[in-house]
Amino acid sequence: MPAPPPDPPAGPARLPTLKEKVRRLPDAPGVYLMKDRLGRIIYVGKAKSLKKRVASYFQPSRHFIQQPKIRALVDMIAGFDIITVKSEPEALLLEGRLIKQYRPRYNTDFTDDKRFLLVRVSLEADLPRFVLTRLRKDDRSRYFGPFAYSSLVRRTLTEMRRRFGILLGDAHPVQIAGGRYRLYDDVRAELYGHANEVSAADYRRRVEAACEFLEGKSREWLETLRAEMQAAAAKQEFERAAKLRDVVIALEETLAKTRHFERAPVMLRTDEVALELLAGALRLPGPPVHLECFDISHISGTFVVASMVHFTDGRPDKNQYRRFQIKSFVGNDDYRAMTEVVGRRYRRLYDEGRPFPDLVVIDGGRGQVAAALKAFLALDLAPPPLIGLAKEHETIVFADERTPLNLPLNHPGLQLLQRLRDEAHRFANTYNTDLRSKKIRESILDDFPGLGPVRRAALLEHFGSIDRLRTAAAAEIREVPGFGPKLAVELHRFLRGGTEEAPP
């Protein structure tokens, strides 16, 4: 089924255009991302059938559309993207990840942490206390949670107070002589079985031990929540599974953020989301973890070179970059050059038994893509997914008969392709510039009379480069076979622009 057309502009005619796009949606599970006229994602939802679910937003007769919140959302929708998946449970997980990434304004039911309790430990205080809260602040406190079961976390904190001698939210410690503190002034001082008068350093050690314990408890609860979420999904109780999923995701992020008392923000990687969105737009079987992009660079048919860059997980993997000089012909033929370098790359991977990338991107349009595909056909190799990115309108061209695709310019998948293409272009141009500079430097020897190819080759072999030859003394040039004192001085003077040097 062809991909949905680009999003329509906002305006009176948007609904018929959106409905036309809806009619082309697949009857498959997935996630949909509603966008406003500025391209901002305002709502993320999951569906067992994308076609039926998205269509329901544009049917005024549907009862749920009459809800004020839904009505306001529908009025804001100017376009949408979709990501197809294999199953409804997979859509459930992807929906949660995208909500956490984009935090759309109409997904308040999912993003509002006030539904769940957090445990806050104020690390900057002399005597940090373990306090229950429903609001996470951007401070240097350490947070645990959110926790779906408030009674469980309250019982756990009570147990921790007895076990570690820590302070909870109802404590009012006082400072006493000698820089020490009295934690409790009532019967609890005897009940908890720990010294009631402590230094700040002694108490800090209690806090560290209690935090390690609470983190361990959090991980136990995390596994329990995951099991409950999977069980709910298996029973097709998707609303309950969605709520449990949100707690699981938030708890996973909190555990990552609070390790070693550090406040290192941990978010779902933008690259990861871009890969998932790109997979949906291109109808790939999964996110393209390994991408390779080719570009041809030349100056009017001279110094023709090619580059290949490799991205892993959406980021440059420079150890796998490759540069190519064109070997099969001389001249200006981008298509022929593309066929050569693509063939050389994947014939080698095939011969070495190494896997092909998840997606091959060609800098160019239909002609360049056809040239790349020709390389695979000539080698009798099944090509991986193959596309071109034509720069004029950032049009995605497919190797099969699919209609070219224009994604919105703010689409994370398109932006990833642009970064990949621009990196290939930069790498090719750098190589081209290096070769031209080297050739220009070497060509200076052509202007020195009486220096044939044998002596010229001997000089380059001895010094390694023209730059090193330029800085050499006449005595060093004499060490090269075929150079006597007179010729060495003359060449030295020539390379120095006529500056005299006395013979050694």
Image (cartoon, rainbow, N blue to C red):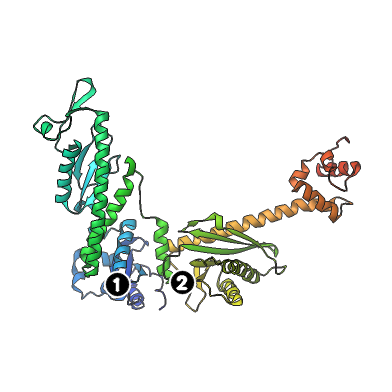
Residue 185, percent across and down?
11, 29
Q: Give the camera-side residue of 254 and 163.
A: 163
Tag 1: residue type? Val
Q: Is residue 412 visible?
A: yes
Contact check, label 2 and label 1, Cβ < 8 Å: no
Residue 450, percent across and down?
89, 52
Relative to 140, say whether 95 is above or below. below
Residue 385, percent across and down?
49, 71
For disc 2, the neighbor class at 10 Å (few under 14, some 14 to 19, many from 20) is: some
Q: Is residue 70 visible?
A: no
* Secondary structure of the residue carrying numbered label 2: loop
In the drawing, does residue 44 fall left or right of residue 420? Answer: left
In the drawing, does residue 432 fall left or right of residue 46? Answer: right
Residue projecting furthest to the left: 187
Among numbered discs 2 and 1, the one appearing first in the sequence: 1
Relative to 157, say whether 447 is above or below. below
Q: Give the camera-side residue of 244 and 163.
A: 163
User: Where does label 2 land, which residue?
Assistant: 405
User: Where does label 1 land, which residue?
Assistant: 54
* Residue ID at (43%, 63%): 413
Quadrant the N terminus occupies: bottom left
In the drawing, does residue 153 fall left or right of residue 293? Answer: left
Quadrant the C terminus occupies: top right
* Residue ID at (20%, 20%): 177
In the drawing, does residue 439 fall left or right of residue 480? Answer: left
* Residue ID at (48%, 62%): 290
Tag 2: residue type? Leu
